[in-house]
Image (tube, coloured by chain):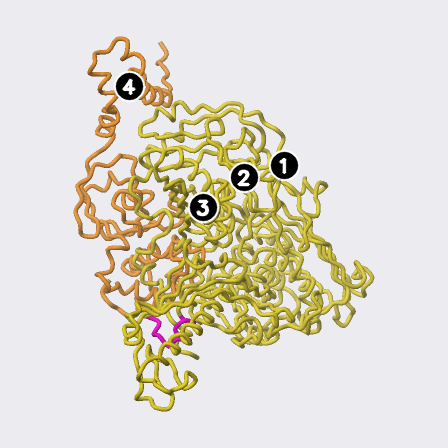
Amino acid sequence: MSKTSNINRVDGFAKVTGSATYSAEYKTAGVTYACLVGSTIAKGRIKSIDTKKAEWAPGVLAVITHLNVEKPAGYEQAKQRNNLGQPLQIFKDDSVRYYDQPIALVIADTFERMQYAASLIKAEYLKEEHTTQLEKAKDKSRNPGGDRAKDYNRGTEDAYKTAEVVLEAEYTIPTEVHNPMELANIIAKWENNKPILYTKSQGVEGTRKSVGNVFGIPPEDVEVHSEYLGGAFGMGLHTWPYEIAALIGSKKIGKPVKLVLHREQMFTNVGFRPYTIQKMGLGATKDGKLTGLSHEALAMTSNYEDFTEATVNMSRFMYDCANVSTKYRIAELDTCTPIWMRGPGEATGSFALESAIDELAHKLNMDPIEFRKRNHAEKDLEQNKPWSSKYLLDCYEAGMERIGWKDRKNKPGSVREGEWLVGYGMGTGTFGSYRNPTTVKAKFLADGNLVLQCSVNDMGPGTATMMTAIGAEITGIPTENVVIEMGRSGLPKGPTQGGSATTSSVGSAVHDACNLLVSKALGLATENPTFKNIPITDLTFANGSVSSKKEASKSVSLTTLLSANKLEELAVENESKGSEEAKKYSIYSFSVHFVKVLVNPNLGKIRIAHVVSCADIGTVINHKTSAGQMYGGAVGGIGMGLMEALEIDHRFGRPINNNFADYHVPVNADIEKQEVFFVNKKDPVSNPMGTKGLGETALVGMAPAIANAVFNATGKRVRDLPITLDKILEPIVATS
Amino acid sequence: MAPKKTNIKKVIEDDTNSRRDFIKKSGLFTALAFAPPSLVMASEKKWDEKIAEYLETVPLSIEVNGTKHNLNVEPRTTLLDLLRENLQLTGTKKGCDHGQCGACTVHVNGTRILSCLTLASMQQNAQVTTIEGLSKGKKLHPMQEAFIKNDGFQCGYCTPGQIMSGIACIKEGHANSREEIREYMSGNICRCGAYHNIVDAITEVKEGGKPL
């Protein structure tokens, strides 16, 4: 274990003292306060909107609607319907496309006056018939197009139907909402006709581009700050109407505008994990060899944008099966556009796949891990490539031992602890390891500090800490002397934070830039009299000094080298990207969640007594922050498995439980005992560090692990999430 | 005779609107025709706004992190918004404005409360401690140190509330077991899911026995 493999978060001091500055917290002279007023119908047209009372209310600076808006230049050029990238064009016309769609922006001099004025706005509508229920839009489903959503066939289509043992089942996941603790928020202003945003974005460069598109200006003219994000989980992957509204408002009044969504608006206006219906067909021989696997998914999108995710893709490569077919369809509903939520499609898909595998194992009267081992994929049959590395079997072993799998009985309901029925379950997760081109600037300063610059964000996984660890490891500069500058435009271009790709992309770029910087320092040293006639290969850089390998007494500090050359700093800016070698392999992270549940047969209450989360993520750069990610992923999976569902009153197309009292997420009391295990073996090709990615796979597989454990405890198979007590109570009562 | 029914909501609405409407409209129309020049000038100089501001605020004397403030606040201003927007103490977080998430937890007179559900004007002479009031320069409070060491957070947004609640949880005598801590910390949601480490941090501080 290296010195940097367990360091504390480098932004810890800022976060525990309240000095970390999130978007709406920037001290901005002359800031004004804005909010959005939402439609009260799900579909139709605005017949009239009365803003007079609001305009006359104290302190009001502007009320903007479709009637008086100065439309951004890019509205006209935009395509009618897009595959993300072009969000809803706020205030474009009188159409209402979903419930709570913003129809007015109110700006006032104080927060309280703004809130009051917003309450005075009244609208009348011409209602049209809406659809918010996926089941009712089934016949209008379509293939969204594009390579990723193509129908997939390997071997014989639907071969499962003729297998010795057949399983067919349908699984449903509800709409789930990201709900980061920090509300979506922005401070928007214009200087010299150029927009400046302090906003909740997971990708500074992406936000520059999409805001540039809307206002018809080049992305270079858009300044974005997003240094601290109070979580996002995917919500910050899109530029949302509220951001554009704040910019429109600020332009109109010529002052900075602060806009913070209400929690209720977080349920309606900034995306969610889409409601998805999945059909599984699995066939196996009697001794447990998979012979056919079919996976179909139907997911919702909005009526103005196509949203897609890799829901069925995991089924193509997870198991050794000759005949596999997958289909992915979307159907338009009158809601806001969904957006990737942690684990995204893979989390949804794994609920169906890993539940079905468990169901089939039960049919075969076989231990579900034994069944998985018999169908373990030795290579990626989808891409027909070898795995770069795969230690999934190690994860199974580690998890079985830690959870006490030996105490599990295949027959449901046969283990008890006092009045509680005990069940054990597990689910496998996976996620592709990606590496995106990233530029990092590394600088040695005369004061002995190493500065690392990149526009990438850190929404919580510990990106800054990872960059510090890698930079310190390569240069030998102590971690406390590493300074990270990130999360804003103007810095060397980093990737969007998403898809578990940040460490692989940015970590590699830090790695490469720091190596080049050390070489540059050595090169500078060869010109120094101390190292006269010593070749560069005999020089080494450690503890902030260049020394001769052969004569350790010959050593010059970097500070001295810089001043001797009249330099304030020594810098390298370098773009780093994936290797050709890596393309020959299939690179995936793997995870397995093991769960022990206790179910009270009289009350139907489910307790997650013990969770063991094991993962093969290649090299672990920092155990502390990685364990945190894994704990958090499992907690997210508990929410998905047992609690989270956005309930819609389809008569009105509006949410019923749009607050934290009614939309349940896991709280501290729900989490009893958690353990984390990492294989921590370097991947030979993924990137220079050998990492594979963690954030997404940390959640994938957790919800089915819970469903499988509940089945093992009660004999009740729940195929529609979340597993609430009403869904299991009845059969328990019947059988006890 | 039947008592006269009054639509209270309507009266309040009418009253608010009529006052505002009167001042605005008199400035624009009526005043031009009939009113003395003073009223026109009042309108031009936005005296109506200034008068309204005076009439709409109440005096408040409050101590925050040891500093006394004598302020004029709107009666509808919450303690949370007073801290964040008026006093620029943004360490206390807004997560829901409904008392459902715990991000806004502060101590008032030594007790943890939800500042989003607390009207500032009702905290006359109160002593408020926020996250900014825990550390002394670089010297952290034991709970802050324990949160860093045990990695009791990721994004950091719920963290100030968790720390204020964690300290109170021990002081209240509700930190005698991991189970008890979990129960008494369940008013503070952490969407990153750092609960395991939050309980570790609080347990460590409790067992460390340092003065809080």
Q: CA distance from mark 4 to mark 2?
A: 39 Å
Percent of width and height locating residue A548: 36, 86
Q: Earlier in the sequence, mark 1 or mark 2?
A: 2
Label 4 amino acid?
A: Ile
Q: CA distance from mark 4 to mark 3?
A: 42 Å
Q: Nearer the viewer, residue A241 or B184?
A: A241
Q: Which chain is orange?
A: B
Number of the front mark, 3 or 2: 2
**SS at mark 4 in the image:** helix
User: What residue range appears in magenta?
Assistant: A469-480
**SS at mark 3 in the image:** loop
Q: Residue furthest right?
A: A162
Q: Which residue is pictured at 23% across the width and 24% down the height?
A: B45
Residue bearing mark 1:
A131
Label 1 amino acid?
A: Thr
Q: CA distance from mark 1 to mark 3?
A: 26 Å
Percent of width and height locating residue A393: 61, 75
Q: Which residue is pictured at 45% across the width and 42% down the height?
A: A243
Q: Chain of mark 3?
A: A
Residue bearing mark 3:
A661
The circle on residue A310 is none
Percent of width and height locating residue B48: 25, 23
